[in-house]
Amino acid sequence: MPEFDVLSFGETMAMLVADQRGDLANVEQFHKRVAGADSNVAIGLSRLGFKVAWLSRVGADSLGRFVVQTLENEGLDCRHVTVDPAHPTGFQFKSRSDDGSDPQVEYFRRGSAASHLSIDTIAPSQLEARHLHATGIVPALSVTAREMSSELMMRMREAGRSLSFDPNLRPSLWASESMMIHEINRLAALAHWVMPGLGEGRLLTGFDDPADIAAFYLDLGAEIVVIKLGADGAYFRTQLGQGVVAGVPVAQVVDTVGAGDGFAVGLISALLEGRAITEAVQRANWIGSRAVQSRGDMEGLPTRIELLAEFNDANRQQARSHRVDASSCGSEPARD
């Protein structure tokens, strides 16, 4: 039996989040968190009870120690995190957002320890995980990180593991848009489950309609394609069928950062449990909706107890509804 359910890899940055609203230049107080789409997903899966191994690099500095301590406290196995004495841990500043508007974010990650990820980082024991989750962020960090992403995905696929891929486009990290499109689609062709946002899918494929975007990735070799539609939910397509799962209404959008990562947590966790695709997308939509109602990148990701409470309550409500419908159908009142 594999030691780990999931292997995830990428860059976790330290994040200094403003305590006051307004331009970052005028903010005097910040609090410290961690940030990174790849590790957000890893944390989310760990909270749901999966054994997750984390592969990365951090600097030999206080921020690197903070990152590793935080991830270990979230239950991630960090034995595959290399401490780099020559390059620093990346970090970012993030403005405070309470009204659903995109926060101001300033990155300091160029030349970071994680940008020096390479094929040499891969160890045979990592390939024993049941599943690999990858995004388009790591290959944008550097040539060596791109080579590692490709090699790790190919080895895991050859080993018969399942792979999920979120394009998570970061155009500013690529030399050109054409390179980004080529490399992201090349990696997506190695994955079984592909989950672009609608805007990403349009840019990457040249198609406007979700069905055509999904068909593009199915033709590349994907088994399941799920396209995030924001508040409208998500469209899914497999070789056997397609459909749309409605979004989850929220009372107030607080912070949109991390919503796609929450979506990935829901989809991956449900599919690893053998759930039907519609149920997996429902869970993905729900976790994504939680993320936008919380300030922070991963604060809204649920625990297993919270997940079970939500869906057990939903099932009970559905069952009560069905009982009411059954009792009121088909019979006429008794006559004397």
Image: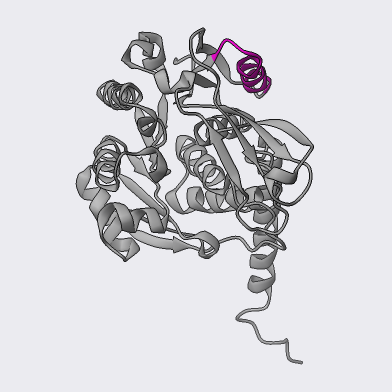
Residue 99 appears anywhere in the view: yes
Residue 89: quadrant of the picture: top right
- 54 with respect to 203 (left or right): right
Picture residue at 67% right of the left edge, 67% below the top: 321
Q: Is residue 77 above or below residue 194?
A: above
Nearest the viewer among 244 and 184 is 184
Numbered marks: total:
0
Query: Which stretch is magenta?
Result: 59-73
Q: Position of residue 275 (x, y in %)?
A: 47, 43
Picture residue at 39% right of the left edge, 62% below the top: 243
Q: Position of residue 294 (x, y in %)?
A: 70, 48
Q: Is residue 311 above or below residue 164?
A: below
Residue 238 appears anywhere in the view: no
- 146 with respect to 293 (left or right): left
Q: Is residue 36 above or below residue 117?
A: below
Which of the image's four quarters has the C terminus? Answer: bottom right
